[in-house]
Amino acid sequence: MPNALNAPRVVLASCDELGGTPTDGEVRMWAIPLDAPPQSEATLFACLTNEERERADRYKIRKPRHQFVTGRGLLRQILGNCLRQSPCDVPITYTGAGKPVLGVGELHFNVTHTDAVALIALATRPVGIDVEQVRTLANPDGLVERFFSVAECAAYRDLPTELRPQGFFRAWTCKEAIIKAAGLSVTTLSEFDVELNPTRPATLLAARHPELIAKNWGLTAWEPIAGFAAAVAVSTKA
């Protein structure tokens, strides 16, 4: 199984440099502050397809509309620069599970956001990304019992009380990143184990789902901005 030694090499790119094709084994990452994106919403809206503009206009609340337009517009610019195409001509399609994918070439991408920050990941192999604000939850123990594996539940209980909030969001972001990379659903969250202890490197410890067993997966976890936990997963096996 993967360990910290084959964690993906994450390159944090500037929002002023929307491009650059990642090398094999590398993940290029953009962290976009949603309260101050590098371009105006009108500019990014112009990068969308007609269908995406209609989708944006269906949002009745400004915040989710802004998040969608910013994330999709910047993604289209990044992919367009890599493919040397106009952003609105980049062929983004969807899998049967509803995951957006690039319709041509060998590039893989994933996008995630909270209210404060959006992350865009680009790689030459399947990649998944997740970010969460580390916050007080009403019933974290119940969420652990519902979504985590038996081994992870035991590991969570073994954590010192002061590390449990960080441990929960470390595990949650790592697990979400893995299922996004593999194109799986939340129903598979208990079918693999990740390292919960935030003082140790992010690692996929064990996998029981066939899709996860078939490929190796590397993990990296970090804090993109203060108070937020993020993780990226990428296949390390072609």
Image (cartoon, helix red, strand yellow):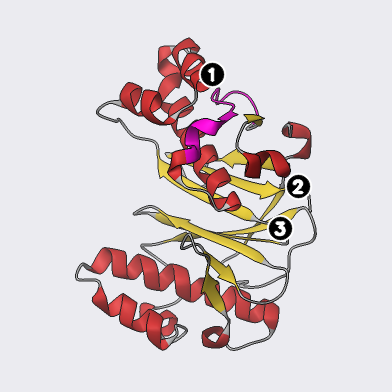
Foreground: 207 or 69? 207
- Magenta region includes residue 24: no
Q: Position of residue 65 (x, y in %)?
A: 30, 70
Q: Return the mark for residue 125.
A: 3
Disc 3 on helix, strand or loop? loop
Q: Position of residue 39 (x, y in %)?
A: 45, 76
> Is residue 208 left or right of 33 when viewed as pictured?
right
Disc 2 on helix, strand or loop? loop
Marks 3 and 2 sit apart, C-alpha to C-alpha, by 8 Å
Using a 10 Å C-alpha cutoff, classify the residue at mark 3 as few (fewer than 14 neighbours), some (14 to 19) or many (20 or more). many
**Position of the N terminus by quadrant:** top right
Amino acid type assigned to the residue bearing label 1 in the image = Ala
Segment colored magenta: 188-201
Instruction: Find residue 205 and report its image quarter.
Output: top right
Q: Position of residue 114 (x, y in %)?
A: 38, 52
Q: Return the mark for residue 151.
A: 1
Foreground: 14 or 6? 6
| Mark 3 vs 1, N-terminal side | 3
**Furthest-left residue in this view:** 60
Q: Residue at x 59, y 39 (%)?
A: 221
Task: Tell me if I can see residue 119 in this picture.
Answer: no
Q: Residue at x 57, y 40 (%)?
A: 222
Q: Residue at x 72, y 46 (%)?
A: 8
Task: Return the residue at label 2.
Answer: 236
Residue 223 lies, with reference to residue 75, above or below; the image says above
Mark 3 and mark 2 in contact? Answer it, CB < 8 Å: yes
Marks 2 and 1 sit apart, C-alpha to C-alpha, by 24 Å
Task: Tell me if I can see residue 192 in this picture.
Answer: yes
Amino acid type assigned to the residue bearing label 3 in the image = Arg
Amino acid type assigned to the residue bearing label 2 in the image = Thr
- Magenta region includes residue 196: yes
